[in-house]
Amino acid sequence: MRIFTYILSIIALGLIIFNLTQIDFNDPFNDESTVALITVLAGLCAILLLAILRVSKNIESKVKNKR
């Protein structure tokens, strides 16, 4: 599960980097730039959710080891 979350995090990071290059910073609310901004935010949310999943799995394994 740990490897899977790291792979998804790397893919999300790659999408963020790619879409940052697609944003026109002179007109960030242009049609294409808006799609890129939304995709960057979605990638950041995905990384955050995967980090929460990793932490919760870590806590779960520590609780199981205490019993």
Image (cartoon, rainbow, N blue to C red):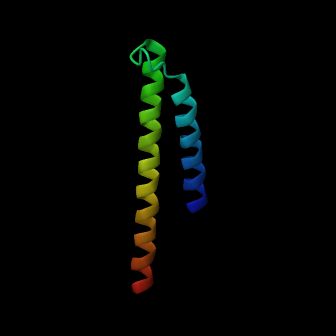
| Residue shown at the point (54%, 23%) measured from the top left | 22
| Residue shown at the point (41%, 19%) measured from the top left | 28
Where in the figure is residue 43, as x and y percent of width and height? Answer: 47, 39
Give the quarter of the figure containing the C terminus.
bottom left
Where in the figure is residue 34, as x and y percent of width and height? Answer: 42, 20
* 30 w.r.t. 65: above or below: above
Compared across the picture, whether 12 is left or right of 30 comes to: right
Q: Nearer the viewer, residue 4 or 22?
A: 22
| Residue shown at the point (60%, 51%) measured from the top left | 7
| Residue shown at the point (45%, 66%) measured from the top left | 57
Give the quarter of the figure containing the N terminus.
bottom right
Compared across the picture, whether 36 is left or right of 10 comes to: left
Q: Is residue 28 visible?
A: yes
Where in the figure is residue 66, as x and y percent of width and height? Answer: 40, 85
Q: Nearer the viewer, residue 21 or 51?
A: 21
Compared across the picture, whether 9 is left or right of 58 comes to: right
Where in the figure is residue 54, as x and y percent of width and height? Answer: 47, 61
Number of residue marks: 0
Q: Nearer the viewer, residue 7 or 24?
A: 24
* 46 w.r.t. 31: above or below: below
Q: Quadrant of residue 17?
A: top right
Q: Is residue 1 visible?
A: no
